[in-house]
Amino acid sequence: MTAIGQRALLRVVREAPPGLYLDGEELGEILLPRRYIPAGTVAGDELDVFVHRDSEDRLVATTETPEAVVGEFACMRVVDTHPGMGAFLDWGLSKDLLLPNREQSRKVQAGERVIAGVILDTSTGRIIASTRLNALLDRIPPSYEKGQRVSLLIAAATPLGYKAIVENAHWGMLYKTDLSGQLDAGQRLEGYIREIRPDGKIDLALDRAGYRRVVPLAIQILEAMKENGGRLDFDDDSPPEAIRATFGTSKKAFKQALGALLRGRRIRFDHPGISLVEDGSGRPAKEH
């Protein structure tokens, strides 16, 4: 079904001086202005287009690609501001996207980049932007599975880590202790559901939780111990900063890897430090 603010594959019905008219199904014929017509297009062809309204509120199509369609979020640059109307965002189309004053969580300034949702103004039928993210997200209960791969848009840094928009529908949190580096607002990533709390809040990870993450790190720890004569000065009490600097991982992941090695009788804790165990017997490895 063809919808305003969405991409659609539409058939060319006829040509006219302004351009091509496309079959917009229940929306009627939709004009594709001549400047957007791909070379060699003829009646009967199907074109992948984005449906929106032009400056005169006429329904039109474009082959340009917006940063986000209705129902999605993106990081967009503020092109200009108008005291009575709001701000105008560059969203990848020739016509900028209006961010009305009423839809701003705070007043934005020209030149800055903002995380905004693309929505349909039900009173006017126009496509607009909104930075009132809390009003747009978490409107339905999360139904993700633990370990499920999800799309993420980094929205903001917090003292704990980074708030991310999950699948254009929910808020989630990536914790600094689980990250190996800095993230930037507007960055798009693939992540995983780590946990959905009883209150519906979502904890995220950039790698799969559990053993599949632990195994490579455990091997890395073993190799480091072998290169250091069968011993390391790291254990459960090591500072997170030292662990990340040496192994490029969080303290939580490091402790999980140590736990796996201990259960497999590959290491022993010396308090402080850890030592290799020979052949899973529980005896210290021989030094050479």
Image (cartoon, helix red, strand yellow):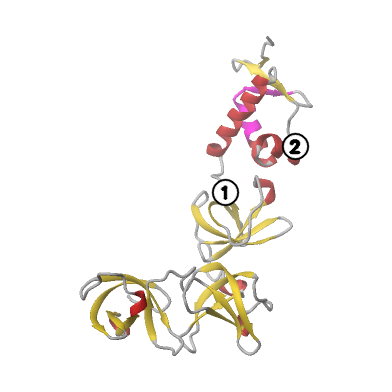
Q: Mark 2: which secondary structure?
A: helix
Q: Residue at x 58, y 36 (%)?
A: 214
Is 78 covered by the magenta stretch?
no
| Looking at the image, residue 125 lies above or below residue 160 | below
Question: Please, what is the three-letter code of the amino acid marked with disc 1?
Answer: Leu
| Looking at the image, residue 153 lies above or below residue 91 | above
**Quadrant hosting residue 228:** top right
Report the disc number at residue 98: none
Q: Residue at x 62, y 25 (%)?
A: 222
Question: In 3D space, how far apart are the residues under numbered discs 1 and 2 (Cα atoms)?
Answer: 21 Å
* Upstream in sequence: badge 1 or badge 2: 1
Report the disc number at residue 206: 1
Image coordinates of residue 99 in percent, x first then y, are 58, 80
Question: Please, what is the three-letter code of the amino acid marked with disc 2?
Answer: Ala
Q: Which residue is mark 2?
A: 242
**Quadrant hosting residue 90:** bottom right
Which is more toward the observer, 91 or 38?
A: 38
**Quadrant hosting residue 100:** bottom right
Which residue appears farthest toward the left when viewing the image? Answer: 44
Q: Residue at x 50, y 77 (%)?
A: 119
Total marks placed: 2
Span shown in magenta: 257-269
Image coordinates of residue 281 in percent, x first then y, are 62, 15
